[in-house]
Image (spheres, rainbow, N blue to C red):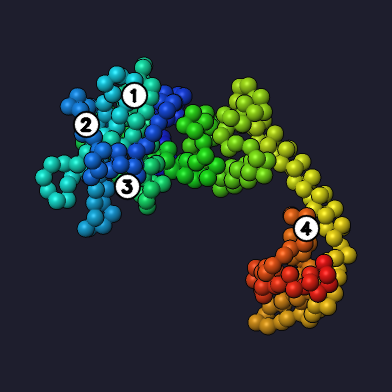
């Protein structure tokens, strides 16, 4: 089944309403989430069956996981437990793999959906885990369509590193602005947003950014415009400063490269810039970024080396 088919299979919980669980924790990779750990917990007898799923990625490798959900004793949070078979035989293994809250007014189905997604996202971060191809062996609170949708939600987030920076609340808000499947142009736009925010030193979270720019209600188009405007202004200022710094060091640059070879290299259908040109370019880039002459050994060109000792060169000209 294609991702598009999985999305259109039914109207689902994840894209039709705001998130209910505001605090979700995955225990994958921790001792609590390790069924062999002394801190692993058995699910209470009152835990409800969520779903039993299986994967098979080769004739000799498969996995069966049964998920159950229960509240804590004080009914403040929902806890998701995973049962798995013990390869050494004997009692089945169990551990708490995710917790979310608050409990109040949140259905077990909704909580199970969010907690399984959190647990699988935790597995993706910890090791090479791919939930695609999972099959439901026994439905409970969730069925095959729900599991398909969870996989699509995870794929949707993982297609962009900027989306991976979002809180659950921001992700649900963003899903109302984007189509179910993102094309390459949209993904490139999201990556550019992340790059601009890094340059600006701003948080990556969508709702935090809307608050920073005083966008009420949240508006993705207005946010993108604001980020692009500020990033363009910053880059223009950096470019001006870089040009000014290079100009201030022009005489030192010209002196340092004055005796370097101007011979252009050729071979294998390639033309290699002269050493003088390579060192000049490196000095301009370095000074433009750092505002000073380099010291020590640097590789002046990614492809055409060699490493260059600027201490020796500066000593030669007493700079």
Q: Is residue 63 above or below residue 303?
A: above
Quadrant that contains the C terminus: bottom right
Describe residue 95's horizontal placement relative to residue 167 as left or right: left
Which residue is tagged 1?
77
Along the polypeptide, which appears first: circle 4 or circle 3? 3
Q: CA distance from mark 2 to mark 4?
A: 62 Å
Nearer the observer: mark 1 or 4; the answer is 4
Q: Is residue 229 above or below residue 265?
A: above
Question: In what quadrant of the picture does the N terminus appear?
Answer: top left
Which of labels 3 and 2 is toward the front?
A: 2
Dot 2 corresponds to which residue? 43
Residue indicated by mark 4: 292
Q: Nearer the viewer, residue 293 or 150?
A: 293
Q: Which mark is residue 133?
A: 3
Q: Residues within 10 Å of mark 2 (few under 14, many from 20)?
A: many
Measure how far apart labels 1 and 3 are at the Cα level. Answer: 30 Å
Q: Is residue 282 above or below residue 146?
A: below
Task: Return the x and y of residue 172 as percentages of the image width and height.
Answer: 48, 30
When the figure is inspected, residue 140 is found, relative to residue 287, above or below; the finding is above
The answer to which of marks 1 and 4 sits earlier in the sequence is 1
Where is residue 290? Give x, y as percent.
74, 55
- x 68%, y 78%: residue: 270
Q: How far apart in space, not on screen, are marks 4 and 3 (Cα)?
A: 55 Å
Q: Residues within 10 Å of mark 4 (few under 14, many from 20)?
A: some
- Can you tell which of label 1 and label 3 is closer to the viewer? 1
Dot placed on the residue nearer the N-terminal end, 2 or 1: 2
Q: Nearer the viewer, residue 224 or 99?
A: 99
Measuring from the top left, give residue 31's x and y in whole percent: 30, 42
């Amino acid at each position: 089944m294609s991702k598009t088919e999985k999305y259109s299979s039914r109207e689902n919980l994840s894209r039709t309403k705001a998130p209910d669980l505001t605090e979700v924790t995955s225990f994958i990779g921790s001792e609590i989430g390790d069924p062999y750990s002394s801190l692993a917990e058995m699910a209470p007898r009152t835990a409800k069956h969520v779903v039993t799923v299986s994967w098979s990625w080769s004739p000799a490798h498969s996995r069966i996981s049964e998920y159950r959900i229960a509240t804590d004793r004080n009914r403040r949070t929902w806890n998701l437990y995973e049962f798995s078979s013990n390869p050494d035989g004997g009692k089945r293994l169990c551990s708490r793999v995710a917790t979310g809250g608050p409990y109040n007014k949140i259905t077990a189905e909704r909580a199970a959906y969010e907690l399984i997604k959190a647990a699988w996202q935790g597995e993706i971060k910890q090791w090479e885990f791919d939930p695609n191809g999972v099959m439901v062996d026994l439905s409970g609170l969730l069925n095959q369509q729900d599991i398909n949708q969870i996989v699509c939600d995870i794929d949707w987030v993982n297609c962009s590193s900027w989306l991976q920076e979002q809180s659950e609340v921001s992700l649900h808000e963003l899903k109302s602005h984007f189509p179910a499947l993102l094309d390459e142009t949209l993904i490139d736009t999201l990556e550019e947003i992340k790059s601009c925010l890094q340059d600006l030193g701003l948080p990556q979270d969508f709702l935090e950014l809307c608050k920073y720019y005083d966008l009420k209600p949240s508006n993705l188009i207005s946010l993108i415009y604001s980020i692009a405007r500020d990033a363009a202004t910053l880059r223009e200022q950096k470019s001006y400063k870089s040009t000014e710094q290079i100009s201030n060091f022009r005489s030192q640059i010209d002196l340092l490269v004055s005796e370097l070879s101007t011979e252009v290299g050729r071979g294998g259908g390639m033309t290699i810039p002269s050493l003088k040109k390579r060192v000049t370019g490196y000095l301009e880039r370095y000074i433009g970024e750092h505002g000073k002459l380099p010291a020590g050994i640097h590789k002046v060109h990614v492809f055409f080396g060699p490493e260059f000792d600027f201490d020796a060169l500066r000593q030669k000209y007493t700079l």
